[in-house]
Amino acid sequence: MRFVFNFPDIGEGISEGKILQWYVEKGQQVEAGDALVQMETDKVVADIPSPRAGVIVARFGKEGETINVDDPLVEIEIEGVDGEEARDVAREKPRPKSEEQVEEKGFGVVGTLEVAGDAAHLPASDEGAPEPSARPERRRKALATPVARAMAREMGLDIDDIRGTGPGGRVTKDDIRKHHPAPAEPAATTVAAPRVEHEPLSQIRKAIARNMIQSKHNAAHMTVIDEVEISELIALRERYKAEFEAGSVKLTFLPFILKAVTKALQRHKSLNSEMDMDNNRMIYKKYYNIGIAVDAPDGLVVPVIRDVDRLSFMEIARQLAELAERARERKLSMDQLKDGTFTVTNYGALGGRFGIPVINYPQTAILGVGRIEKKPVVKDDQIVVGRTLPLSMSVDHRIVDGGEATRFLNDVMRFLADPASMLIL
Amino acid sequence: MNSSKTKPKRALLDEYGATSGKMLQILDYEGKVIQAERLPKLSPEEIVTAYKNMLYARTADQMAVSYQRQGRMYTYPPNFGQEAIGVAVGTVMRDEDWLVPAYRELSAWLAKGATMKDIFLYFGGHEDGSVLGSARNMLPSAVPIASQLPHAAGIGYALKYQGKKDIVFTFVGDGGTSQGDFHEALNFAGVWRAPVVFVIQNNQYAISHPRAHQTAAQSLAVKAEGYGIPGIQVDGNDYLAMVAAVQAADEHARSGEGPVLIEAVTYRRGAHTTSDDPGRYRTEEEEQKWAERDPLKRLKGYLLDHQLWDVAEEEPLISQYKKEIDQQFTEMENHPYELTDIFVHHYADMPDDLKQQMVAYEKFLNWKESQQ
Amino acid sequence: MNIMNMVQAVNDALDIMLAQDKNVLVFGEDVGVEGGVFRVTEGLQQKYGADRVFDTPLAESGIVGTAVGMCVAGLRPVVEMQFSGFVYPAFNQIISHVARMRNRTRGRYAIPMVIRMPYGGFIRAIEHHSESMEALFVHIPGLKVVIPSTPYDAKGLLISAIESDDPVIFMEPKRLYRAIKQEVPEGRITIPLGKAKVLAAGEHVTVVSYGALVREVQKAMSLAKKAGISVELIDLRTIYPIDRETIARSVQKTGRFLAVTEGPRTAGMGAELMSIVNEEAFLSLEAPPTRLAGFDTVPPLARGEHHYHHSPERIFYEIRKLAEY
């Protein structure tokens, strides 16, 4: 089959060459590598060898004539090769740019160097010109360790928004934990009645906010909910109410609840505990300071009754009353607010039934007490009027699992349903 | 003596040329002149001075070994027994000529203007010992063996290029002649006709390796043939023969004829360094044999023969030298070592990151101090 | 203004320095009569004479060692190692004397020598002609190491190197010798040693490279741009001393770092650059500092070298990993 062999780029990025002398005639048999023609370029005078063996069918260009790279040079008839293949062979594999193939003997150099074409060249360097990245300061980027950055990312916070209090202004993990986004801009007021009211945050409100977030962030809240039938307890209270009042103490259900809780805690130490991550340990408390959440005028406070296991019902009742009054008058001391090991929140007094209370961190559990209701209950397979007390207990699921929580609550309910068991068991 | 002065010096390099197999000797082992016609041109005062220089060098060398044994200085390579070679070079060398040493040519160092304090500083572990401020045109020690020889060739080229008439004297040991740099340096110097006098101190040992096993060549001087330069073998413990040889080489190089290779045959009477025990590889008999050929002994014999020396002068002279040398040693011991010197001399201007390292280290030192 | 490739730019720099300072000499193997195997020193011997531009016997240690002597005697030799793969016989002279003479003589003798050598691969060469071992020099205290990536920089850096009183190892990426043409001003221009250059400002990823790979990174940046990734490219230029400040400032802005180098990975320049990022910009990091280096292998010969030398795709691949970290 025939193919046309074009004038190749023999290196150095030449674009044309002058035919100096033909070495072959039409009809001549050539071997691969035989010199076909002598070409002159602006770099070298070179013989162009035949890429294949065959018979010269045609020559293109006369001696003295200048031709361009890729112009046809000769047409060769190759034996035993079919048409398509011949054309592929004829076409030189395209090179990215021209390449200078220099043998070791010639230039003394080895290898193949890429040679830039004449067409494109770079402009001179702008050495000494101000650097492109030297722009006026953009929004300051926060300094933070990779660990802190990961934490912020997890919490969905933009770390650049957080103020850093660490060394060198670094944003620490604590900074991230304590960060709360700035309040959104209130809508602009109009001339008519204002649609928005501003109130600066009080210390107590800020503290509550901080504590709530801290609790929710650290403890894995899990809540168990149940009801206990307390007709017996109600009857018991009726029996002694007058005697308490004689001592100027109002007897509510709370002392019984506190006692029941304390006795149950004695049996389930994990609910009277604290997880100490910093020191890699659990702290089990052998004392029982029960906090009572009180709805005070400017917010929630939790005064604590200490050593409930050692107090009589009378004493508990008395303290409850006193703490409640102090709370209302905002006269609670620091001592009366700290060292709680367990908290009871009695929203039942306000009419609530069930809830999902927030643990008073770093305690492990909180018991929410709802309002007592008259309800139909089943007793000895009969439907009777029962008096039920709703209980909602949240525990830190890192420390207390479902089984333990349920067992504890069952104990509390047992003590409340059958008050004598608190005495006997 | 006959008219040795009329014989052209070039004939010395011919007669005692590399392939002649002859070793130039003028004094026998007692200091008697055995070849008067080869006596170099030296005044009696010059010869006496030479003897005193050898005495000083030997005294200093012994004291250096002693200081090392006292734990006041670190590893030191004794020059004991090789004093004549350096003193002879010092006799011929001019002020502006370059000295490119190896590390065991104390008498040449001193001749060039280096002080014992410099040498004590170097072997006392202080870089200031390589500054050699009082020695013009001198490089410090070269620890990688023979690596100084190409330096000498390069200086030689520079001197020619600058149109100067000065030349270079450089030293190497018998072991060093096996190194590639010896070959390359002599080859370059030969091709360039650089004005370099290469002095091989063949003290018979490269640590424990005897000269006979260092090369199969019949001598070290004969290697000059391979580079197309003249070579001469001379008795290195014969001060007068050394001077004659060095003078001939000096003239050859300075006249633009190119480099010369001198093989000075001597003996390392001490150990390789103060950490070496020669008893492990040589005999007392051999050491005794070479003690008979000691350079100071022979020159003293010559001086006494010519009534140029009074033995009674020797003791007080040595005492005086000892005092001076000890003074130099004390100065070395009091010479401070500055922390910043570790950092500031690596570049013309200290790069920022090196500065950072220095500052960080200083911070640590401050903290350490505050803990006391 | 002339349009030059790197060979011509280096030749121009040598020409200017030979004219400017009588103490400058240029020598090495085949640099005089033939003008160098890459023609870098072409015409210089004819112009300045064989006592200033000359051919030496075939002995690399001798070339560097005699140059040490010349420096000590007040000259400024610019010596050539024909290929970086042949510098090893001269290593003793380089480590023991070139790098050390100033310090050990407390500044009395400086060595204002430049050792030039073509280096680097991807040119289908035979063995030993494709080395990229600049890290070996960087690890020697007392040397400076410079690698240009363009003709302009080659000229400016070489003139600065020759004028510097410190010894400079000047490594010319032979792959680029003829591959780039650039406008280069006539006459003396200098580029300060020790200063990297920000070639392109970017927001997301800092890439530091030098030599032949700068061009490949630039190609990778086009791919990155299509993917919405903005790359800040820094050409190191002086491999020692490293311009820590420029790198630090950049990573403090982007938080992501990639070093792209040719030579073997272990204890290579990538490791040093990552350490610098760690020391200077740790608190700004969004992703681990990363290095794209050659394999810990001898560079493969022509049939396999395309695996070894980073393509723009490979570089983009690493950039994207960083951006998506």
Image (cartoon, coloured by chain):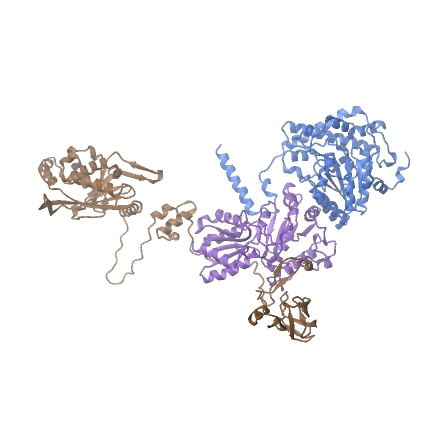
Chain colours: A brown, B blue, C purple
In the depicted view, which residue is nearer to us: A18 or A176? A18
For residue B4, side relative to residue A338 (left or right):
right
Instruction: Give coordinates of residue A389: x percent, y percent.
Output: 15, 44
User: Where B203 sits versus A114, above or below?
Assistant: above
Number of residue marks: 0
Instruction: Give coordinates of residue A32: x percent, y percent.
Output: 65, 66
Q: Where, quadrant-wise, is the N terminus of chain B in this rendering?
A: top right
User: Where C168 sits versus A286, above or below?
Assistant: below
Extreme residue toward the right, this view: B2
The residue shown at (77%, 45%) is B226
User: Where A260 sits versus A19, above or below?
Assistant: above
Instruction: Give coordinates of residue C2: x percent, y percent.
Output: 63, 64
Using the rendered view, name the quadrant where residue B10 is placed. top right
Using the rendered view, name the quadrant where residue C19 is placed. bottom right
In the depicted view, which residue is nearer to us: A290 or A139? A290
Instruction: Give coordinates of residue B182: x percent, y percent.
Output: 72, 43
Residue A132 visible in this rendered orientation of the protein: no
Using the rendered view, name the quadrant where residue A387 is placed. top left
For residue B333, side relative to residue A145 (left or right):
right
Residue A25 visible in this rendered orientation of the protein: yes
